C-alpha cells in the first residue's frame, strides 16, 4: 500500500493535521494495523518536501501546536495517476503462510511438523474470518450497516482468508497423500 497516495487521498477531502489523517485512515481501514503517528508525520514531511502537499497554517487551539496540511495540484495529479494505474497482483509464494508451510516441510522439524503448522494456520484463519464476518464491535458486515468503504475492505480480507484456507486444505490433502519417511 502506498502511504504517499493514501495521505494524498486523505488530504483531498480538505486541509487537515496529522491527528485527523491518522484518525481518518484508521476509520477507512478499521481491520488494518493502526497507522502510527510517526509514519503520518514523516510522510507529511516528504509530501511537503516533494511539493505534493503544503503547510497552510499552524494552530495551537489551547493545546499543542498543530500544523495543517493541504494537497497541492501536483499532489492531486499524483493521486489521480496512482488511481488510474492497476495495482499489481500479489506475488505468489511470498506470503508468510506459504513460507512457513514450505519451511516446515523442508526442515522436517519434529517439534513443528508441517501438518501441525498447516492445521494451526487453518485454525487462526478461521478464527479471523469469524471475527471479520460477525456483527460484533459495530463492524456492520452481517446487517449491511456501517461504512461502505470499511465493509468493502473487510470483505476483501475475508475473501483473501478464504483463498488462503483453500490453499491450506490443498496443502493438507497433499501432505496426506505424500509418502511417509521415517
Image (tube, helix red, strand yellow):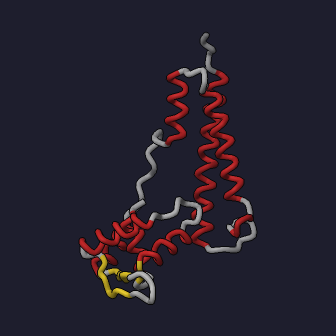
Tell which of 133 and 23 is nearer to you.
23
Instruction: Please tell me whether residue 109 is drawn above or below residue 145 in the rendered image.
Output: above
Is residue 122 visible in the rendered structure shown here? yes
Q: Quick one: quadrant of the N terminus?
A: bottom left
Is residue 140 visible in the rendered structure shown here? no
Instruction: Please tell me whether residue 67 is drawn above or below residue 122 in the rendered image.
Output: below
Please tell me which residue is depicted at 50% across the width and 23% down the height of the picture: 106
Residue lying furthest top in this view? 182
Please tell me which residue is depicted at 40% across the width and 84% down the height of the picture: 15
Instruction: Classify residue 83 as left or right of residue 168.
Output: left
Whole-percent x, y for residue 49 in the image: 24, 72
Tell which of 134 and 177 is nearer to you.
134
Instruction: Classify residue 172 as left or right of residue 67.
Output: right
Instruction: Classify residue 113 as left or right of residue 82.
Output: right
Tell which of 106 and 33 is nearer to you.
33
Residue 112 falls in which quadrant of the image? top right
Please tell me which residue is depicted at 63% across the width and 25% down the height of the picture: 175
Residue 82 falls in which quadrant of the image? bottom left
Amino acid at each position: 500500500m502506498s502511504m504517499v497516495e493514501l495521505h494524498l487521498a486523505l488530504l483531498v477531502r480538505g486541509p487537515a493535521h496529522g491527528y485527523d489523517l491518522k484518525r481518518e485512515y484508521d476509520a477507512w481501514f478499521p481491520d488494518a494495523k493502526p497507522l502510527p503517528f510517526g509514519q503520518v508525520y514523516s510522510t507529511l514531511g516528504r509530501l511537503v518536501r516533494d511539493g505534493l502537499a503544503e503547510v497552510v497554517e499552524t494552530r495551537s487551539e489551547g493545546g499543542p501546536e498543530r500544523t495543517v496540511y493541504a494537497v497541492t495540484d501536483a499532489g492531486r495529479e499524483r493521486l489521480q495517476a496512482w488511481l488510474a494505474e492497476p495495482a499489481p497482483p500479489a506475488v505468489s509464494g511470498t506470503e508468510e503462510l506459504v513460507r512457513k508451510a514450505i519451511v516446515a516441510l523442508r526442515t522436517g522439524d519434529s517439534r513443528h511438523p508441517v501438518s501441525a503448522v498447516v492445521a494451526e494456520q487453518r485454525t487462526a484463519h478461521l478464527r479471523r474470518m469469524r471475527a471479520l464476518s460477525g456483527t460484533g464491535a459495530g463492524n456492520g458486515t452481517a446487517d449491511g450497516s456501517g461504512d461502505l468503504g470499511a465493509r468493502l475492505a473487510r470483505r476483501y480480507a475475508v475473501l483473501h482468508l478464504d483463498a488462503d484456507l483453500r490453499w491450506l486444505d490443498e496443502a493438507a490433502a497433499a501432505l496426506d497423500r505424500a509418502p511417509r519417511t521415517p
